[in-house]
Amino acid sequence: MFAFFLRRLVSLLPTLVFVSMLIFGLQQLLPGDPAQILAGEDQSPELIAHLREKMHLDQPLPIRYFYWVDGVMHGDLGESVRTQQPVLELILQKLPVTAELAFLSMLVGLLISIPAGIISAVRPGTAWDYGANAFALSGLSIPHFWLGILMILFFSVELGWFPASGYVSPFESLRENLAAMIMPAFVLGTGISAVLMRHTRSSMLQVLNADYVRTARAKGLSERVVVLKHALRNALTPVITLGALELGTLLSGAVLTEQVFTIPGFGKLIIDAVFNRDYAVVQGVVLVTATAYILLNLMADIAYFVFNPRLRHA
């Protein structure tokens, strides 16, 4: 397993290099001169020339790329034009918020999708199967922002159970934090659960017809042991991959949901950066998001060995 992990880790390095080149190159195509934006109202040629030299904008593109990569390797992602704060500092402020929302949403999605997928596969053609598929279709069809608005109107305005918007750190008050995060987590979790449920059902249907499952039943094992111990463990392999990708999507910032519930995460950060042409922030957020995707795929590969023992001997 260690050799496999090492090979996968080495194979990720070219991907990271290519992603960094793509991010840096595409940013150069965006309109506007960062030096002029930083100069503000004082558009003196001397100040603009000084800023261009400081930011290496007077250098050729490959040289500027290596300067940027060197800064990234040392934890320097640049500086925000709007707030004059280091980009890494801004990301570290927003990342815990979005990470908490992402993991809570994934937890909601898993708690709904795995049982629904198992029941749907074990009882095909029944009311349970039709109900699970109807839920999956509705979860994929209903826009997150619309569901979020409805939940705010019902649970916040009508019932007063949860706050309509805002965010409270769990270190300040865990109760208020969960109260503020439960609705956006459910909104995002329903969409994830719909996708995961369909894949869980499809994988379980294939596995339940496998020879080793029939052998387990022939040995006299209970249906519960056959389904949960023998079938589910092998059916989770494709679900793990999909779950890692969905978690990466959530970490990139559920823009609309964070806007609806006024959550100060990656979504708000990236929207503010785009509207203010704060290219360094956009570049830093995209780089962190792409790296998260790559690392989550690596974690998914490692999880294969945990959930599927046959792969350990492959």
Image (spheres, helix red, strand yellow):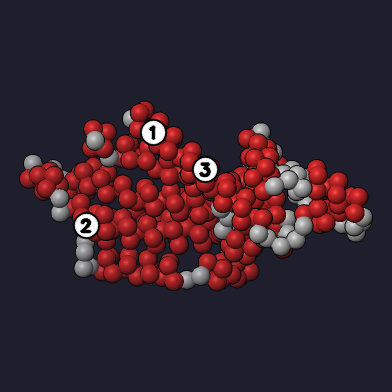
Q: Secondary structure at mark 1?
A: helix
Q: Nearer the viewer, residue 129 or 48?
A: 48
- In this picture, residue 289 sits left or right of residue 61: left
Q: Residue at x 40, y 31 (%)?
A: 6
What is the three-letter code of the residue carrying label 2? Leu
Q: Is the residue marked by circle 1 packed among few (<14), some (14-19), or many (20+) residues within 10 Å?
A: few
- In this picture, residue 54 sits left or right of residue 159: right
* Residue 126 percent location from the top left of the image: 22, 67
Q: Secondary structure at mark 3?
A: helix
* Residue 104 percent location from the top left of the image: 51, 50
Determine which residue is flagged by label 3: 16
Q: Which mark is residue 256?
A: none
Determine which residue is flagged by label 2: 205
* Residue 51 percent location from the top left of the image: 83, 47
Q: Nearer the viewer, residue 284 or 193?
A: 284
Q: Secondary structure at mark 2?
A: helix
What is the three-letter code of the residue carrying label 1? Arg
Q: Which mark is residue 7?
A: 1
Separation of residues labelled 2 and 3 (CA atoms): 37 Å
On the question of residue 154 being in view, the answer is no
Separation of residues labelled 2 and 1 (CA atoms): 33 Å
On the question of residue 307 being in view, the answer is yes
Q: Residue at x 70, y 54 (%)?
A: 279
Q: Nearer the viewer, residue 258 or 10?
A: 10
CB contact under 8 Å: marks 2 and 1: no
Q: Quadrant of the N terminus?
A: top left
What is the three-letter code of the residue carrying label 3? Leu
